[in-house]
Amino acid sequence: MPLILGPLSFVISHSSFVRPPSSVGIELTMKLITALRLEDGEIVAFVGNGGTSSTMFRLAEEIVEAGGRVITTTTTHLALAEAQSAPVHFSAFEIDRARLEAALDKKSHVLLTGPLDLENGQAVGVTPGLISSLRAVPDLTAILIWAGGAHAGLFKTPAEPEIPAEATLVVPLVGAEVFDQRGLLQNGLRQARVIPFINQVETSEQLTAARETARYLLQRPTILSVALGVGRGSNPVREVQGRVAAIVLAAGRSTRMGRPKQTLAWSGGRTIVSHIVHQLKSSDVDEVVVVTGSDREEVEAALLADRASARLVFNPDFENSELAWSLHLGLQAAPAGCLAVLVALGDQPQIEREVVRAVIQRWQETQAPVVTPVYQQRRGHPRLFDRSAWPGLLSLPPESNPREYVEAAGQIEYVEAATDSILRDIDTPEDYERERGRQREE
């Protein structure tokens, strides 16, 4: 199952702050259920206006397509025209538990509202107590709630929208221009996980602007990730922007080199390990963790001398453990807010920023458990592991190699590298001289 990320997401209407659309469209590749990392048993409240109810019904359709069962409902009111999006619509005051479960067995999606107000063309909302009782319905994947709109893109008074206390995920639709004006991340929301969904991203120019906005939003520690897309269609999401940390495995003993290879000179006055850290931090990586071992003092001194900012972790069992244990320690030291880690080797200074960015971009487009670069069908480094893959990595015995998990992982995405730099490492003095020669030529 996907990792639980927390109880709060924001959906931001992108149309209010982008430049005029270009003629070049973008491809939407991801489902909402993936972008929001929806868990079984979620109670999701949607608030706002400008397409929020249609996004709610799209998520319900995805749940059904995935073999789940879902109840949609409202605590405020819902236009009867919008209610037609559900295959079955009942008034909660006219249906008993047996009929509800029978309808779910047949259609997998049931809309429950209060009485119909035909004069105003809307269905009245249900009481919070009813939503609490719906949690007892067996084999229910999620309850999705339309909890109210907003005037002119702004939030209403504190009494509105009517978000049930049981909600595990809240998805407001607000205009970007009010994101900072209304104190949305204050008070009780400060402790919540926040996943903005920038909506109505339909062109390449809008995508560029949305990415800039996502990077701005991710400066806030309360925001975990940002989804970009269009809240309709079979694949509403283009990509998910999230924090990515890097782990540099530099605990090796350099036996064949005869001296600490991570501290050998490389380029620009930097050592090998400092150069790797620099390449990663200039390639959309938010933080770097360096796992040291045999040559701890030398590696730490090299990083300090080169002003290469990194979080340092020591592997005290470097003599008896393999890469898996260093990776284990690196994962434990990774920042709590990152959704993926990029694993690089401390003896591969040929690491290219273009490869790093391409690997991260593929993950943003797929949220795959593993993304790895390949050259002529051979897998190399750096490899990216989504947070959902971490339990598998952490379960590896110390003497194993992460390659074993990559082989057993479900979905692996590949990025074709232009050169064999992802395969080359430095183990011997001959390797070092050869790679230095290549580096000078380039």
Image (spheres, rainbow, N blue to C red):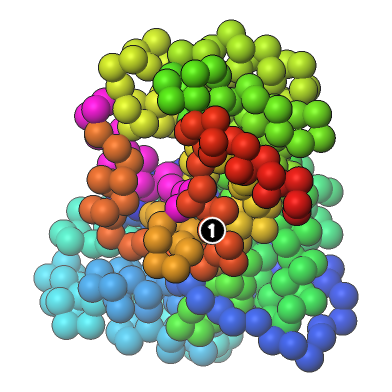
Identify the secondary structure beneath mark 1. Answer: helix
385 in the magenta segment: yes
Q: Label 1: how many residues lie within 10 Å, few (<14), some (14-19) or many (20+)?
A: some
| Extreme-right residue of the structure | 19
Q: Relative to 416, say whether 303 is above or below.
A: above
From the top left corner, tell me how far across and down residue 196 is, in percent: 63, 56
Of 440 and 416, nearer the camera is 440
Quadrant of the rendered image containing residue 70: bottom left
Is residue 16 at least partly visible in the picture?
no
Residue 167 lies left or right of residue 290; in this view the side is left
Measuring from the top left, give residue 305's x and y in whole percent. 76, 16
Q: Position of residue 347 (x, y in %)?
A: 53, 34
Q: With respect to residue 45, does 8 lie above or below? A: above
Q: Which residue is mark 1?
A: 420
At 15% across and 76% down in the image, what residue appears? 105
At a point 16% along the width and 71% down the height, the residue shown is 101
Q: Which residues are magenta?
A: 380-399
Quarter of the figure with residue 111: bottom left
Queried whether the magenta region covers residue 288, the answer comes back as: no
Query: Where's residue 265, x and y in %?
Result: 70, 27
- 108 to the left or right of 207: left
Residue at 58% x, 72% y: name it: 238
Q: Amino acid at mark 1?
A: Asp
229 and 321: which is toward the camera:
321
